[in-house]
Structures are given as structure tokens and as C-alpha cells.
Amino acid sequence: MSNIEQKLPCEVVQDILPLYHDGVCSGASRKMVENHLQECRTCKTLLQEMDETEMDMALADETKEVLEHHAKRERTLAYKTAVVIAGLLLLPIVIALLMTLPGYSDLKTDAAIMASMLLVAGFTVVPLLSRGKKLAKTIVASTAALILLIFIVEMFFDHGNWITFGEIACSTMFGLSLVFAPFVVKQLDLPETLVNQKALLTVAWDTIWFYLMMVMFAIDNPIYTQDLFLPGTFFVALGWAIFCDYRYLPGNGWMKTAVLSLLVGIWGTIGNALGWVSVSVMTKAGETPLDLRGWILAITLGLAIVLFVIGLLRQKGQSKRIKA
């Protein structure tokens, strides 16, 4: 029997080895495996690897449990911190309300204080309480509080002018959108059809606020409506053309930059002809505007041709390397 045990094939022992490692095989099988392991280094190494794998799994589970416990403590601490900060922010409001009762203050002041505290809370309490998409929630909450503060100041302390409020609010939203809209849109949960169109949504959002700002300015100054919308649309169209160039046109970066150069030349030439893009020099007679229509188009067209040729050559070189 001993000779048979010692001559067991490694394949048979390795089939039994998991059962042996877990201690669920029969006594006879255990003895056979132990006798084989005394003579076979390969199977003995395999058993050691099983032990190490089990230790690694146990260590991984323990590490995961520790990290989860630590994360839970951090969330609890952040929540408690947010509650404390929120309580501190409430103190000025409570004090202001108490002063209002005997007539020492007024509701306008209280409203302004509340809006100010909400703005501070947008930067402090919101990110501490949020478990996901903290940046987007902080931007949205802070922007909403800022618009509310502008509304209260303009309506309660500056003669209640809706038009002026609209101008300031839309201008503020447009300026903030240019900077922060990409970060908010990036964290949005969008339908599958729009997941890859976040850049398009960002540009469209900025465009909407730009025209809302123009509308408010035009309502306040009707005689300047044409002067506002024509140049504004002219430059918005340039922005959309540049976006579509880099986002949707085929070709490499050199080719897209060539198209960009051509776009700048065309828009610069038209804008200079209409007086919307102007460069002037000082002379003895005073400031004299320069007619740059020919120069702008010639320089940018030449640059576009050079860049396009470079891009075409690089594209052909890459194609040859791929084929090789």
C-alpha cells in the first residue's frame, strides 16, 4: 500500500489537495496526501500557496472592514461638524429675529443676514453633509444662496427694481456658469443618450444665460437692442464654431488648429469691417483705427494652410507606422 501511495500521480493529489487543505477529506485520503507531500515538492509548494492565498483573503477582508469602519467614523464626524457649523450659523439669525420683536431691527435686515448665512453654509455645511457629488452640490447651493442674496439686497435696499435684479442675476449666472458649469455637468447623472454630450450641454447652458443677460440689458436699454444682440451673436457664433471644430470635425490636432486659424481670420475680417474688432494707433491727429481686413485674412489663411499640411503629413506618417 505504501508503494501505491508514494506513486500517486500529482494530478490525483492536486484534485484532493483543496479538500485536504480545508480538512474535509477522509483519514485514508489525508494519509495518502501527506505521504505524497513528503516526496513531491511541487504539490507541497501548491499547498503553501493555498495557505498564503487564504491569509491574503483574510487580510483583505480585515482591511476592508477597518476601512469601512474608519469611513463610517469620518462620515459621522463630518455630520456632527456640519450640525455644529449650522448651529453657529443660526445664532446671528436668531439674534436678529429676537431684536426684531422689540423693534430694534427689521425684516429686511434679517432676510439679508439669512441669505448671507445660507451663502456661507453653501461652502461649509453642504460639502460636509453630502456623501457624493460634493463639488456639484456645493456649487449649486452656493449659487442659489448668492442669487437669493442679490435679490434681497436689490429688492429691499435698492428701490425694488426687478430689471436691475434681472441684469445682475443673469450676469452673475453667466459668469459663474463659464467657470463652474463644466464641473457640475460632469457630475450629473444623465440619460445614456446624453452621457457623451456633456460638453455640448455645457456650451448650450452658457449660451442660454448669455442671451438671458442680453435680454435683460435690452429691456433696460431698448435703444441699444441691436447694438447688444448683433455683436453678441457674432462672437457667440464664433465660440460655437470653435467648439464644433474641436469636438466634431475629423482629423488630428494640427488640422483642427488650422480650421481654428481660418475661423479666427474670417470672423476677425468681418468684425473689423463692421467695427466690432478694432485696432488703432496713436498719431498726431489722434487715435486712428487700422483697416486690418486684408492682413487678418491673409495671415490666418497662410497659417491655416501650414498647419493643415503639417497635420496631413503627421496623419500619413501615423498611418504608415500602423500598417508597418
Image (tube, rainbow, N blue to C red):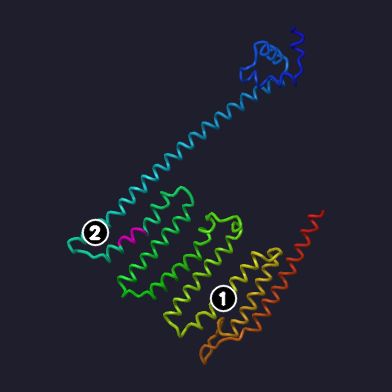
Q: How many marks?
A: 2
Against 87, residue 312 (above or below) is below
At x 48%, y 56%, the residue is 136
Q: Is residue 227 left or right of residue 26?
A: left
**Residue 100, which numbered label?**
none
> Could you say where residue 172 lies in the image, as x and y percent from the top left?
44, 68
* Dot 1 crowding, Cα within 10 Å, few <14, some 14–19, many 20+: some
Please name the residue shown 77% across and 13% down the image: 7
- Give whichever of 159, 312 is nearer the camera: 159
Marks 1 and 2, how far apart at CA: 49 Å
x and y percentages locating residue 60 in the rendered image:
55, 32
Q: Position of residue 73 (x, y in %)?
A: 42, 39
Residue on which disc 2 sits: 97
Locate residue 106 relative to residue 127 in the image: left or right. left
Q: Where residue 27 appears, x then y in whole percent?
A: 65, 11
**In this picture, is 11 found above or below 101?**
above
Tag of residue 235: 1
Give the residue type at disc 1.
Answer: Phe
- What residue lies at 55% left-to-right and 77% top-to-bottom? 233
> Is the residue 176 above or below the residue 8 in the image?
below
Q: Image quadrant for the N terminus? A: top right
Between 301 and 27, the one lying in front of the other is: 27
Stretch in magenta: 113-118
Relative depth, front residue between 100 and 258: 100
Q: Quadrant of residue 276?
A: bottom right
Amino acid at dot 2: Leu
Q: Which label lies toward us, 1 or 2?
A: 2
The stretch drawn in magenta includes residue 117: yes
